Image: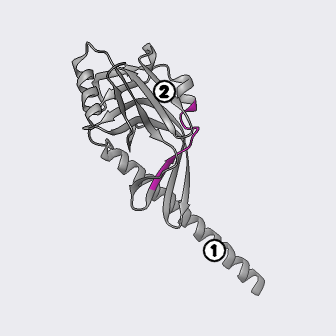
């Protein structure tokens, strides 16, 4: 499985008193536009299994594995799902200058977007008049990140666009089969 990234305009907060960062790393409902004809939404149950089974999700700075802000495995990152999305709270290490710099950038508003890295375990695809909508039903969450620029790797975009092309191709083949069956049925009645 390929690790993919998505981003949202965040509502990150930095509380200097408690050394905590908090905000939504993913939201449910709005469509994430991947291309003019391909979109994606996150099902509210998409993170359920991963939050139960994944023992150690990291919070990284800009997806950089060298700057770990917190992790669920040691209790410095907590993640939960509510009606709005995937909410997280990270306790920042005051002895880590990279982490404190990240907190200062968020507090000042220089960084306000979030992203999450994941693998798709289950998805539904819907063809909507030539457009394709992917519904993420189940994902394996690897990490969440406050990000300077939204991270979405070209390989992920290409992979999803390839998936969309395959959905459209299968729908077209299905349409052709239905038309042929109708024509064959009509010819049989005429004969």
Quadrant position of the C terminus in the picture? bottom right
Horizontal side of 102 relative to 44 (left or right) equals left
User: Residue 44 colored magenta?
Assistant: yes
Q: Looking at this view, is 33 or 27 the one in front?
A: 27
Alpha-carbon distance for marks 2 and 1? 52 Å
Q: State the image coordinates of residue 31 (x, y, percent, origin top left).
A: 47, 52
Residue on which the image places disc 1:
180
Is residue 191 among the parts visible in the rendering? no
Q: State the image coordinates of residue 99 (x, y, percent, origin top left).
A: 27, 22
**Count of numbered labels shown in the rendering:** 2
Q: Looking at this view, is 35 or 90 the one in front?
A: 90
User: Residue 132 colored magenta?
Assistant: no
Q: State the image coordinates of residue 27 (x, y, percent, origin top left).
A: 48, 42
**Mark 2 secondary-structure assignment:** strand
Residue on which the image places disc 2:
79
Q: State the image coordinates of residue 60 (x, y, percent, origin top left).
A: 33, 27
Mark 2, Cα crowd under 10 Å, few <14 / some 14-19 / many 20+, is some
Mark 1, Cα crowd under 10 Å, few <14 / some 14-19 / many 20+, is few
Horizontal side of 71 relative to 173 (left or right) equals left
């Amino acid at each position: 499985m390929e690790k993919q990234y998505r981003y949202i305009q965040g509502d990150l907060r930095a509380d200097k008193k408690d050394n905590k960062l908090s905000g939504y790393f993913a939201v449910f409902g709005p469509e994430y536009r991947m291309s003019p004809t391909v979109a994606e939404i996150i099902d509210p149950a998409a993170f359920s299994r991963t939050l139960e089974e994944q023992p150690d999700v990291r919070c990284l700075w800009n997806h950089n594995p060298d700057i770990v802000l917190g992790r669920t495995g040691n209790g410095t990152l907590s993640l939960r799902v509510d009606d709005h999305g995937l909410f997280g709270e990270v306790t920042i290490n005051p002895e880590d200058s990279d982490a404190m710099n990240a907190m200062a950038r968020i507090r000042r508003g220089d960084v306000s977007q979030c992203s999450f890295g994941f693998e798709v375990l289950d998805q539904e695809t819907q063809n909507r008049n030539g457009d394709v909508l992917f519904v993420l039903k189940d994902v394996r969450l690897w990490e969440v990140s406050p990000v300077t620029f939204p991270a979405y790797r070209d390989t992920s975009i290409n992979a999803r666009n390839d998936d969309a092309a395959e959905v459209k191709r299968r729908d077209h083949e299905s349409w052709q089969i239905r038309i042929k069956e109708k024509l064959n049925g009509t010819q049989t009645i005429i004969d």
